Image (spheres, rainbow, N blue to C red):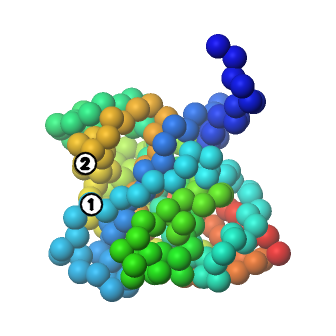
Amino acid sequence: MDFVIDPAEPASAAVCGGGLFPVRRIFCIGRNYADHVREMGGDPKSSSLVFFTKPADAVVGNGSSIPYPLMTGNLHFEGELVVALKGGGVRLQTIDEAAALIFGYAAGCDLTRRDLQAAAKDAGAPWDAAKAFDRSAPMGEILPVADAPKGFLDSARLETSINGETRQAAPLNDMIWTVPEIIISLSELFELKPGDLIFSGTPAGVGPLIPGDKVDVRIGDLPSLSFSIAE
Ligand code: MN
């Protein structure tokens, strides 16, 4: 069968050492660091897994200059660990099963139109306009698990800096839901598949970006993510 119009380019993310990771879906976890739950006015103890999605083509690579998004006056950065899946499944049962699906890790940023998110929260409305906009998922190169240091998730720290000033700094093991627990929970709702990405939540320190800002997200030995907001 021929397509009746030209299909979109497949969404992809660069892999450290070469090659492209084909992006199928992007799942994002909210409220996964207690200090960030508190700064957003929530109670970490009442936190169940909160998630939303972004379109696959929201991914932009390292070194991008991103136009200030439409219809917002309060664009926020959220530095996050990104998990790339090479396998899938539904209703996974064990931590080992979940961990075996991981292809690699990357440094990412969940760009957020915070004013639209606050309005959606007030209205009990969906978050799509706040989270799932064009170029809202910058990410660095993916480091395959085989090349990640042993115990990476337990020892690495996430650090986000804006124009060279550190704004977020937290160990990955501050996560409320660990990476395998996130995978298990998502698999109770969806059939996960190779190509899925998971943005695993952000620690405290989120804040606004303005045109000209330079954002750096560093996580342990992962390739760092740098991007700027266009003037
Ligand atoms: Mn986030």
- Residue at 31% x, 62% y: name it: 50
| Element on which disc 1 rests | loop
In this view, 58 is above or below 20 = below
Amino acid residing under circle 1:
Leu
Q: How crowded is mark 1: few (under 14 residues within 10 Å), some or many (20 or more)?
A: some
Which dot marks residue 163? none
Which dot marks residue 185? 2
Percent x, y of residue 218: 55, 62
For the residue pair 200 and 216, the one nearer the viewer reads as: 200
| Element on which disc 2 rests | helix
Q: Is residue 99 left or right of residue 16?
A: left
> Is residue 185 in view?
yes
Percent x, y of residue 226: 67, 62
Q: Residues within 10 Å of mark 2 (few under 14, many from 20)?
A: some
In this view, 145 is above or below 119 = above
Does the numbered disc 2 mark a residue whose Cβ is under 8 Å from ligand 1? no
Q: Is residue 107 left or right of residue 121?
A: right
- Residue at 26% x, 60% y: name it: 49
- Residue at 18% x, 38% y: name it: 94
The quadrant holding residue 202 is bottom left
